[in-house]
Structure formats: C-alpha cells, structure tokens
Image: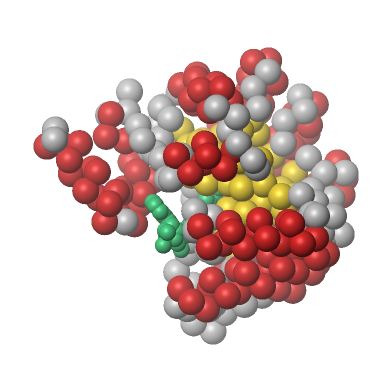
C-alpha cells in the first residue's frame, strides 16, 4: 500500500488499484494513460517483467472495457541493455495491445535515447498503421526536424516541454524560449498533421494556444495531464475537449512522488501538511 501522502500522484502499487482510479476518471469523462513506474534497468529480468505486466495490463483494460491506454519508458523495457532488447520487448507489447485494441504511448527520455525511440516508433506505427504514439520535447533543438519527419507517420505525437536537464549545445534554456518553441511546434502540427496531436502540458497558455489553433485549422487534438496536477481543470476541460490523465502506479513510486512533490512549492506544502496532519 502506498501512503495517503503519495496517493494524490500515484494510483497505487497494484494494477487493480490503477484500474479502479481509471474507472473513477472515466465516470467523469476523463480517459487514462496508465504507466507502470520503472526506468533504467540494467538487467533483462525486470525489463522483461515490466513488458509482461504491460501486456497483462492491456488485456485487463480491454476486458474491463475502460477508456484507457498504456505508456512505456524505453529504458524500462531494455534500452540501456541495447536497442535490440528494447525493440523486442516493445514489439511484444505493441502486438499484444493491438490484439486487444489498446493504444501504446512511448515516453521520451533524455537526448541519448531520442533516435532509438523515434526509429522504433516509426517502424511500429507504419507496421500497425497507428495504434502507437511517441513524445517529443520542445526544449530540444532537433525537435522541429523530428516533428517534420513525424508529420506523415500514422499514430499520435505528444508534445511536452521536456523534463530532462540537457546540455546547452543541444537544448533551449529558459522558460520563455521553451514556451515559444512549444507554441511553434503546435503551430506546425495543427497546420500539417491530419490528427493525432496530444498537448502534454498543464500550462493554461499552451492549452489556450492549442484550442485557438484547433479553432483556426479544425485539426483534432487531445489534452494530457498528470494525475494530481490541476485535476479540477482536467474535469472542466473534459466537458468540451478530449482529456487524458497520465496515471502512474507500481512499487517503484518513491522517486516519482519525490519529483512531483519537489517541482512546485504548493506540492511541497501539500506533502508537508499531509505529514504533519493539518
Ligand atoms: P510548466 O512550464 O511546468 O508550468 C507552466 C504553468 O502551468 C505554470 O505557471 C502553471 O500555471 C501551470 N502549472 C504547471 N504545473 C502546475 C501544478 N502542479 N499546479 C498548478 N498549475 C501548474 N516529459 C518528458 O521529457 N518526456 C515525456 O515522455 C513526458 N511525458 C509527459 C506526459 C504528460 C501527460 C505530461 C503532462 C507531461 C509529460 N512530460 C514528459 C513532462 C513535461 O516535459 C514537463 O516537464 C511538465 O509537463 C511541466 O511542464 P508544463 O508544460 O506542464 O508546465
């Protein structure tokens, strides 16, 4: 059992707890992207075990008739062990999920993984004619070119600002610059993509920009936010737009919870208040 303090950001340790949370979201018209927490395995065994759990999760989602998909980290399913291992495990996940009609997102990690991640995405998306999505990061200078490459690949693309501290030579620094880049990427996507745009941001300015681009170009899009971050905004936006909540679960919740608690003063206060019981 995870402590109540962490349950704002993490759905539980077991898949059944995550699916219970998904059911509650679906009741409020929010769909779910379920993520089993884990990353950077240097052993095949945990990488394979997580890949198997994702396949079981896809079966459970289909069986329970939930509006949910899954999201996988490359280093969780073997990328640190080699691109071939990552590809093998990812292919198994995507094929099982496709058999059950469940969509698979591939999260994006730091810049050393970008090529391997995009190549795997493109091959699988073309092979399955969709059913797979990948994340791109506005803070990386290469992303404008990557997005051009992805424009005619079937599948979806999640646009985020980028969560990794990258070297100066390859990354934009400073909130303003990254925000401008994010907006420019959305502008390109709404103009050139037929659909499959996911706005992975809590930022009201980025979401408003996406809404006005949608109104201008008519291109469909979805909004994605993390569990425990602007939950009320998620429910409100779901009245009008397609909203997906990223729902992490699993035994490896501590470092994820720590990151969420530390990233904003309000979250840190929330954690402290929960500890002291006020
Ligand atoms: P920020 O730039 O952090 O904040 C901008 C504004 O948003 C704030 O001023 C505030 O108004 C509002 N806001 C932000 N957070 C809060 C909060 N906690 N409470 C209230 N208001 C808030 N990164 C990756 O590198 N790879 C991934 O695969 C990846 N997947 C993601 C999937 C999803 C669904 C989401 C939502 C994010 C993902 N990220 C990923 C993280 C992303 O890169 C950013 O680090 C993260 O989303 C913070 O940027 P932001 O756009 O949400 O807003």
Q: 154 or 203, which lies in front?
A: 203
Q: Quadrant of residue 71?
A: top right
Q: Position of residue 97 (x, y in %)?
A: 73, 30
**In the figure, 276 relative to 14: above or below?**
below
- 278 sits to left or right of 186: left
Q: Residue at x 78, y 40 (%)?
A: 131
- Quarter of the picture holding the C terminus: top left
Q: Residue at x 48, y 44 (%)?
A: 233
**In the figure, 36 relative to 22: above or below?**
below
Residue 130 shows in this picture: yes
**In the figure, 220 relative to 186: above or below?**
above
Q: Position of residue 158 (x, y in %)?
A: 65, 54
Q: Position of residue 146 (x, y in %)?
A: 73, 68
Residue 84 shows in this picture: no
Number of marks drawn: 0
Q: Position of residue 250 (x, y in %)?
A: 44, 32
Q: Residue at x 51, y 57 (%)?
A: 204
């Amino acid at each position: 059992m995870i402590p109540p303090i962490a349950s704002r950001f993490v759905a539980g340790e077991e898949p059944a707890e995550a699916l219970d949370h998904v059911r509650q979201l679906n009741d409020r018209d929010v769909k779910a992207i379920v993520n089993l927490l884990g990353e950077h395995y240097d052993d095949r065994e945990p990488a394979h075990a997580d890949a198997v759990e994702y396949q079981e999760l896809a079966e459970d989602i289909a069986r329970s008739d939930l509006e949910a998909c899954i999201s996988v980290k490359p280093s969780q399913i073997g990328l640190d062990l080699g691109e071939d291992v990552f590809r093998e495990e990812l292919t198994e996940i995507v094929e099982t999920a496709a058999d059950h009609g469940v969509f698979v997102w591939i999260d994006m990690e730091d810049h050393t993984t970008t090529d391997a991640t995009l190549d795997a995405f493109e091959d699988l998306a073309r092979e399955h004619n969709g059913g797979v999505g990948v994340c791109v990061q506005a803070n990386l200078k290469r992303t404008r070119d990557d997005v051009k490459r992805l424009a005619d690949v079937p599948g979806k693309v999640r646009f985020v600002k980028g969560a990794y501290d990258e070297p100066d030579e390859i990354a934009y620094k400073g909130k303003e610059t990254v925000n401008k880049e994010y907006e420019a990427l959305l502008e390109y996507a709404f103009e050139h993509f037929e659909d499959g745009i996911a706005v992975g941001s809590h930022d009201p300015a980025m979401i408003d920009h996406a809404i006005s681009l949608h109104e201008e170009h008519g291109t469909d899009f979805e909004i994605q936010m993390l569990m425990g971050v602007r939950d009320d905004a998620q429910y409100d936006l779901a009245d009008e737009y397609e909203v997906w909540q990223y729902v992490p679960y699993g035994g490896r919740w501590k470092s994820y919870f720590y990151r969420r608690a530390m990233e904003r003063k309000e979250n840190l206060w929330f954690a402290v208040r929960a500890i002291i019981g006020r």
